Image (cartoon, rainbow, N blue to C red):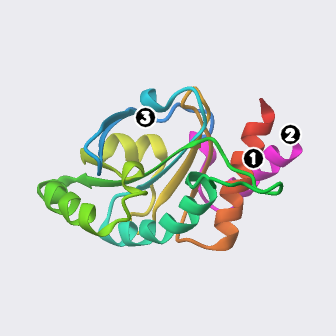
């Protein structure tokens, strides 16, 4: 419990308002690279989720920098786990957001990424096409050039939020937040 409180305080100290902590993640309809449709958070309820969002080209590029580390930490399941292997059972999604003038590029970019992103990761990449304002307000987006990450509890409430380019320390913060949130149950 102390760990969870510390993480929440650190999030606030690093400038991302924790006003969204405890709020339900706003409803978002999205399509995966495997052409499956999801409504977040409803379709991922029942277990913890990690959702990364990007709403600019620069942020999308930085979001891609998270693909491999997050895949290795939260998605990959070792078929022959050793005694010290630990895997997380959480939903994990990366969501490029096509809003405003970028909406017409949605299908073109989706088709391009289907050819370039590892097939094992494709079910975890969702595309959103629509308006930004509701998400910007609800999720406290304050800069368009960085990706945003949210850890949701099984009911879709935000238990942790951060933003930024990939770094080992950011990855550790997210991992600690997921572990802490799961330990609370």
Upstream in sequence: badge 3 or badge 2: 2
Secondary structure state at the residue bearing disc 2: loop
Q: Quadrant of residue 43?
A: top left
Instruction: Give me the C-alpha separation between circle 3 and circle 2.
Output: 26 Å
Q: Which residue is mark 2?
A: 1
Horizontal placement of 6 versus 105: left or right? right
Instruction: Give me the C-alpha separation between circle 3 and circle 1.
Output: 23 Å
Q: Quadrant of the N terminus?
A: top right
- Residue 111: x and y in percent read 18, 60
Q: Quadrant of residue 101?
A: bottom left
Q: Which residue is mark 1?
A: 179
Residue stretch in magenta:
1-20
Q: Which residue is mark 3?
A: 26
Secondary structure state at the residue bearing disc 3: loop
Q: Nearer the viewer, mark 1 or mark 2?
A: 1
Using the image, determine if residue 82 lies above or below residue 40.
below
Instruction: Give me the C-alpha separation between circle 1 and circle 2.
Output: 11 Å
Upstream in sequence: badge 3 or badge 1: 3
Q: Tell me whether the residue at label 3 lies in contact with that at label 2, contact meaning CB atoms closer than 8 angstroms.
A: no
Using the image, determine if residue 128 lies above or below residue 116.
above
Confirm whether the magenta stretch covers residue 12.
yes
Examine the residues drawn in magenta and state their main secondary structure. helix
Judge by depth and name the residue closer to the eye, 59 or 23. 59
Secondary structure state at the residue bearing disc 1: helix
Could you classify mark 3 by the number of other residues whose Cα lies within 10 Å: few (under 14), some (14-19), or many (20 or more)?
some
- Residue 175: x and y in percent read 69, 55
Residue furthest left in the image: 104
């Amino acid at each position: 419990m102390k760990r969870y409180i510390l993480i929440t305080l650190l999030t606030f100290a690093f400038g991302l308002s924790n006003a969204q902590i405890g709020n339900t993640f706003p409803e978002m309809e999205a399509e995966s690279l495997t052409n499956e449709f999801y409504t977040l958070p409803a379709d991922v309820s029942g277990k913890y989720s990690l959702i990364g969002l990007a709403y600019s080209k620069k942020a999308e590029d930085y979001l891609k920098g998270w693909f491999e580390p997050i895949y290795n930490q939260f998605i990959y399941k070792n078929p022959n786990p050793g005694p010290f292997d630990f895997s997380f059972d959480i939903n994990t999604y990366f969501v490029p957001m096509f809003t405003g003038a970028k909406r017409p590029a949605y299908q073109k970019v989706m088709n391009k990424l289907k050819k370039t992103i590892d097939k094992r990761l494709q079910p975890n990449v969702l595309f959103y096409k629509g308006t930004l304002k509701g998400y910007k307000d609800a999720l406290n987006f304050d800069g368009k050039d960085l990706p945003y990450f949210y850890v949701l509890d099984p009911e879709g409430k935000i238990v942790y939020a951060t933003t930024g380019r990939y770094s080992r320390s950011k990855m550790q913060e997210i991992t600690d937040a997921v572990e802490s949130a799961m330990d609370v149950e």
